[in-house]
Structure formats: C-alpha cells, structure tokens
Amino acid sequence: MDTISFALNEKGFMKVGIVCYPTFGGSGVVATELGLSLADSGHEVHFITYERPVRLDTFRGNVFYHEVLPFKYSLFKYTPYETTLAGKMVDVAINEGLELLHVHYAIPHASVAYLAKQILKSKGISIPIITTLHGTDITLVGKDPALKPVVEFSINNSDGVTAVSHFLKEATHKNFEITKEIDVIYNFIDFNKFKKSDKDHFKKAIAPNGEKILVHISNFRSVKRAEDALYVFEKVQKQIPSKLMMIGDGPERANLEVLCRDIGLCDEIRFLGKQGAIEELLSVSDLFLLPSSNESFGLAALEAMALEVPVVSSNAGGIPEVNEDGVTGYLCDIGDVACMAEKAIHILSDPNRHEKFRKNALRQALNFDVKKITPQYEALYERVLLKMAATV
C-alpha cells in the first residue's frame, strides 16, 4: 500500500497524528514531548486535540496543530466531542496523508480512533492505531462498568498498545480481558529542557534566609494526597528551617489552604498555582514530596530527579520503578506521614548525604532520557506498519 511503503522508505520518516488531552496532566505532557522529539528526529507530527497542548510552546516547521471545534446544537445536552474528534481525525488523516495515529489515554481516544480507522478503511485507507495507556484510564475511570467494555474492546482492537510502567501493564491485565500484547515504554525526560541552572534569585525570593525548599507538584486531586505533603512539611519544619512550594491547582486547593491556616504555617508555604517552567522552580528545590495513593509512573518525581532533587514518596503503583528506595530518595507506605518526614529529615540534615542523593537522582533520571525512549516508539511504529503492510 502506498502510505505504508512511503512510511518505511525515505529513511524511516513518517507522518504521525498524535491525539491527547492538552492539559498539564501527565498523559498530555508525555504525548506532547514525544511528538516534539519525533519532530526533532525528522518525522512530521500532527497534534489533534481541542486546545493547543501546554507544552507545545515552540515553533517547529514539521509540527502542526489541528483544533477539534465543538459542535453546538440545541438538541444536544452535551457536546458530542467524540464524534467531532473522530471527524477531525479522519479529516487530518486524509488531507495530511497521515501514516499512523498514536492516541494517548484510552478514554475516549482509543475508541474514537477505532471509529476513525473504520471510516478511513471504508475509503480505502489503512492506518494503524497505537494506544498508550497512562494510568487512571485503566486503574480508575476505565474500570467503571459503563466504560469497561468499550475500553477493553478499544485496547484489543488497537494495532499496538503501550503502558508507561510494568505496574500499569499488570493492572491492565488484571482489570480487563486483554488479548493484545502490551509493550512497556517508560515516560521520559527531555534533558535539553530539564537541565539544572543557576536560579539564585528564585531561591532567595522563596527562602531568603537559606531555608531548605521542599516541593510538591500535582493536580491537587484526592488521589495525590497533597494534604500529606503539608503534614510532612509540618514535621520537617520543626527540625529544619524550610519552605514548601505547592505547585499546581485542582479541586483540593481550597481545602489545602484551609489546612495551611489550621497548622499555622501559611507564612512558610507558598501556593504557586500552575506553572509552565517548572524546571526553574525545581532547580532551586532540595526535596520533592510525592505522597500519592496511586501513580502509574510518577512523571513529576522523574522531572524533579532530572534536576538533582531527591524524592520522598509513597510506594504506590509504578513509583518504585522510578524512585529507588535508599538511593534516589525513599519509599514509604501510603499515608505514612511520620515515615516520610523522618526520611526527609534524614536526607536534608546532612549536606554530604543530601549531595549523594542528588547525584543518584540525576543518574537514575538519565535512564529515562527522551533520546533513549523515542527510538522505542519508532521501533514500535515501524513494526506495526510492517505488519499492516504484510496483511494488505
């Protein structure tokens, strides 16, 4: 078939469509960073979503953005996003000559991709679909009885499936009847962006008297247990002069601010909201707190480690695949605030020990360099394209 032949010639350059959520969440960040890395490798990348992704903030000649516009009609109580998304995927595939569609976060993107694939097939166009599972699409939302059959069907009818950790792969097999092979391809770091830099002016603004800076980054949802970060900080601050940066926003933000007042530490805690250049804030941080009750991978922790910030976290989900206990930081049971505080104090109380953890964090993060991960996706794309070519 012409499209497949083209994809496997021309030195392997492809036209890839990427469908994702455009928000600060991990799936959208990973999808965008992957697309930019593919573009840097010479591929032509087309993002298809309802807003410009937050990490799509630089111009590249071979990167394109296609907005999915809502269709409004008085009959509809809810805008039929899935239908308009499918139509846009078909439109872009035909008019831009896409050779592959890569959808991130199963709901609803995998099922919509299946519909788009069938529409394209009716027009004589065969395009493979890659689905990347990111976490709550499997461990939380996807298990809902109303969604489970659709998610299961969509995964099994994808041409390639990836999960961002071994934990997530196992959870997918546990929660669904999956017949499709799942490749584990870890999340990653672009070290061109996440590179430690001198930001002393930031540090002095946050910690004018040389206090240690602890940081928590999340979407402030209940699963992140952001309140535990405040409780940990309360214990740490009693022994080590320190400040806490709470980066992000979400439904628990108001409750956290009330808790801040209740424990009497609002002068030591700063709520910074959503931040685009988090690498600048991480560059001045001394310790990262990740007390989540469920994490498929722990991308925020990896980003901190890339900037030499040790991590004290829960042992939930895929976090132990990133944060090595006693090496890059420490792991504690979910909700064990006393353990997390003890480990944080252990790291921060000795400069030599702190420096050792810093170097270990960076060394581990380098294993997740985007330059090592992108070729794994490229190999999967090529394998799927060759398989489809053999069946046409």
Image (tube, helix red, strand yellow):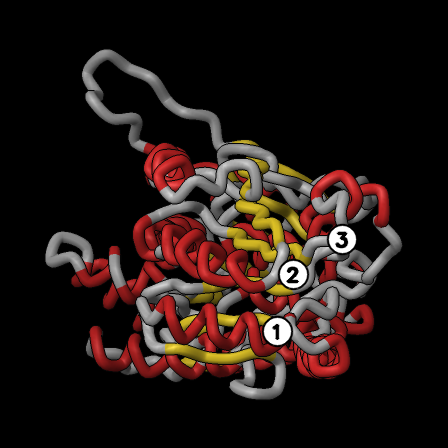
Q: Amino acid at mark 1?
A: Tyr
Residue 307 x %, y %: 74, 65
Tag 2 residue: 34
Q: In this orientation, does residue 375 appear?
A: no
Q: Are marks 2 and 1 in contact (CB under 8 Å)?
A: yes
Q: Please tell me whether mark 1 sits on a helix, a strand or a loop.
A: helix
For label 1, the residue is 377
Q: CA distance from mark 3 to mark 1?
A: 43 Å
Label 2 element class: helix
Q: Nearer the viewer, residue 192 or 3?
A: 192
Would residue 94 be found to the left or right of residue 146 on screen? right
Give the spatial CA distance, label 2 vs label 3: 37 Å
Q: Residue at x 64, y 50 (%)?
A: 97
Q: Residue furthest front?
A: 239
Q: Look at the image and tell me whether residue 141 can be seen.
A: yes
Along the line of sight, the residue nearer the viewer: 312 or 218:
312
Q: Is residue 15 above or below residue 78?
A: below
* Residue at image mark 3: 210
